[in-house]
Image: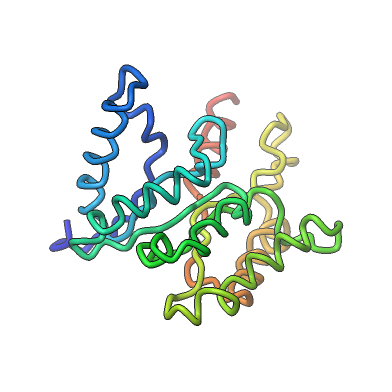
């Protein structure tokens, strides 16, 4: 894959269900080992998409353990390992990686999503604290360790998607995208974000479903 002009960034959706018909320890361990070898064919790879969500759930301790045990195998061919890629980029998942020397050393990219609030910092302390935590990662942890800025690896805005009236599909409007998507991108760059990946596929899927229904 590395000899063609395509950049592949991989995010496994649910490792613990992949090829596993039971939950015994041997099956889970075999899957983890196979997955670590499989991950070697990408430019960069996340060990789990949104480990904090109930449909892909890993505990923070399980994330750290996987990175420590299999990080070197995954990175052996030059693949950059992204961790922990939580849905809300919350400290409960990010800090255990940052504070474990071995797991942090095996993490090339600290990544996460912004689905739980980021741009509306005037709405209250919850969003403000999230914003400040994420934007503070580079200066507080990453720069001193010689790592690049954090990555925002998935987000999209889809307000109005459940409306039957196309005039209420906010996600199609320029002013909406400027005040949401563009604002968020700008704020991420101000916070030393090195890569911002907008989930445009989700928007296309939403739009196509609307067209098909008409």
Residue 78, horizontal then vertical, whole percent: 22, 65
Number of disc labels = 0
Residue 201, horizontal then vertical, whole percent: 47, 45
Answer above or below: position of 88 versus 174. above
Residue 131, horizontal then vertical, whole percent: 70, 64
Left/right placement of residue 13 relative to residue 27 reads right
Residue 208, horizontal then vertical, whole percent: 52, 35
Residue most toward the top? 21
Q: Quadrant of the C terminus?
A: top right
Q: Residue at x 54, y 71 (%)?
A: 193
Answer above or below: position of 57 versus 150. above
Left/right placement of residue 208 relative to residue 48 reads right
Q: Quadrant of the N terminus?
A: bottom left
Looking at the image, which is closer to me, 120 or 107?
A: 107
Q: Residue at x 80, y 63 (%)?
A: 121
Answer above or below: position of 54 versus 171. above
Looking at the image, which is closer to me, 207 or 96?
A: 96
């Amino acid at each position: 894959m590395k000899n063609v002009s395509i950049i592949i960034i991989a995010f496994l959706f649910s490792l613990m269900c992949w090829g596993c018909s039971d939950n015994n320890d041997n099956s889970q361990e075999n899957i983890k080992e196979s997955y670590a070898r499989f991950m070697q064919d990408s430019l960069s790879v996340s060990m789990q998409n949104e480990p904090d969500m109930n449909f892909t759930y890993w505990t923070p301790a399980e994330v750290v353990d996987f990175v420590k045990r299999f990080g070197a195998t995954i990175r052996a061919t030059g693949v950059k390992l992204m961790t922990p890629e939580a849905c809300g980029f919350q400290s409960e998942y990010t800090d255990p990686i940052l504070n474990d020397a071995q797991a942090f050393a095996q993490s090339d990219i600290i990544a996460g999503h912004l689905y739980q609030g980021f741009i509306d910092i005037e709405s209250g302390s919850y969003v403000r604290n999230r914003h400040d935590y994420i934007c503070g990662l580079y200066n507080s942890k990453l720069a001193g360790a010689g790592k690049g800025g954090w990555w925002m690896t998935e987000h999209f805005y889809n307000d109005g998607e459940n409306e039957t009236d196309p005039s209420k599909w906010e996600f199609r409007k320029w002013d909406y995208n400027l005040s949401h998507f563009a604002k968020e991108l700008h704020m991420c760059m101000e916070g030393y974000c090195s890569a911002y990946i907008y989930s445009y596929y989700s928007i296309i899927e939403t739009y196509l479903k609307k067209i098909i229904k008409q």
